[in-house]
Amino acid sequence: MTATAITNIGELVTNDPEAADLLGVVADAAVVVEGATVAWVGPAAAAPPADQQVDAGGRAVIPGFVDSHSHLVFAGDRAAEFAARMSGEPYAAGGIRRTVAATRAATDEQLTSQVARLVAEMRRQGTTTVEIKSGYGLTAHDEARSLAVARQFTVETTYLGAHVVPDGTTPEEYVALVTGPMLEACAPYARWIDAFCETGAFDADQSRAVLTAGAAAGLRGRLHANQLGPGPGVRLACDLGLTAVDHCTYLSDDDVSALADSGTIATLLAGVEFSTRQPYPDARRLIDAGALVALASDCNPGSCFTSSLPFCVALAVREMRMTPAEALYAATAGGAAALDRDDVGSLLPGKRADLVLLDAPTYVHLAYRPGVPLVAQTWVSGRPV
Ligand code: NIG
Ligand code: FE
């Protein structure tokens, strides 16, 4: 197998759990890639021989971003809703129904090309693993085809039939559909199941019923919770031992303790607070309590239409009181933990060679130079893409 050495790396972020610092930073480093896998990392002066060399020109190299929360399968545009919000309208989950109508009317080809466009946009910004949810179909047929489209791009697909109750059905009828025939149609295309546990969407009992039915069908659980106000979702996620609970915008002290005492990852979605003018959650409070934190984009047409994890890192540092190191860790190793993956999110021998060359001498520039396109090159499975 051909070995490629990326040399002359000014600063390498490995996320090595054995390192003294959070990011396992190595200065003047090299990475040797064999096939799709990292074979060696360390100081360039100690690098083993390789068949070919790539000169990083002193750039910083980081693990590819792991975006553990997105809703890319949709049609239509809600720019007018965003503009109205910026003129004072509140964000309401009801806008989801507008996207549902547009998504149902779209062809499979239209949905596929939309996801392809957004995944390419993510890659240009350094994302190498993405989770994609359904949730804008809300019929067995439209949820299953949304997941079939998502499956063409990632193994991390999430069935979110429990997004909102569609018009023309009662909550009881709809939960029966989501936990019955719709689950049966979707399970073959999904790894995860999710529900929107929020006033106006699904309550704790309904969310628990959805997650329990999903678990019985072999799907792992994650949950949207505490986005629009305080609520029972975060504690439900911790009680059920879910891998991740996402949003966590409004947290009580009990919620923070529950997260700190559980292995459930709190996924913070800074772009949502930016795009809905909601208060940012305080990541410092979570980290200092001992909770595990991830950062993700939540890319969707309503509450947050950014695909950029560099932007989310910058927001998390400026607005959520994370250090640049904590924010980068949360968007890489944190995202991998939130997807229960140990092959991505770090650059160590045996891991997938997913990495990003930054036009910057240090990863700190991700927050220090917000809005600047710093991603020079993204590598997925050992190759530039
Ligand atoms: O994660 N919270 C629920 N779902 C999305 C928003 C969906 C929409 O507004 O279309 C979210 O914010
Ligand atoms: Fe979401």
Image: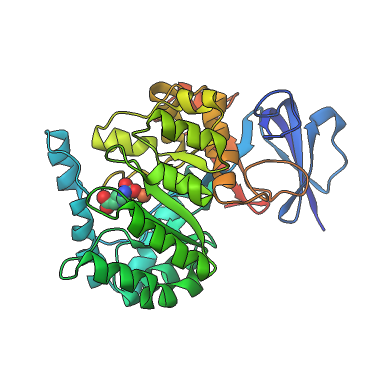
User: Residue 269 appears at what percent x and percent y?
Assistant: 40, 39
Taking the image as shown, residue 15 lies to the left or right of residue 138, namely: right
Q: Count numbered badges in the picture.
A: 0
Q: Is residue 218 visible?
A: yes
Colour scheme of the picture: rainbow
When the figure is inspected, residue 281 is found, relative to residue 3, above or below; the finding is: above
User: Residue 22 appears at what percent x and percent y?
Assistant: 65, 27
The residue that appears at 60% across and 40% down in the rendered structure is 333
Quadrant of image for the N terminus: bottom right
Taking the image as shown, residue 122 lies to the left or right of residue 32, namely: left
Q: Nearer the viewer, residue 352 or 272?
A: 272
Q: Nearer the viewer, residue 207 or 293?
A: 207
The residue that appears at 26% across and 54% down in the rendered structure is 201
Taking the image as shown, residue 379 lies to the left or right of residue 175, namely: right
The residue that appears at 70% across and 41% down in the rendered structure is 347
Q: Nearer the viewer, residue 236 or 7?
A: 236
Q: Splitting the image into 4 quarters, where does residue 275 fall? A: top left
Q: Is residue 116 visible?
A: no
User: Residue 264 appears at what percent x and percent y?
Assistant: 53, 43
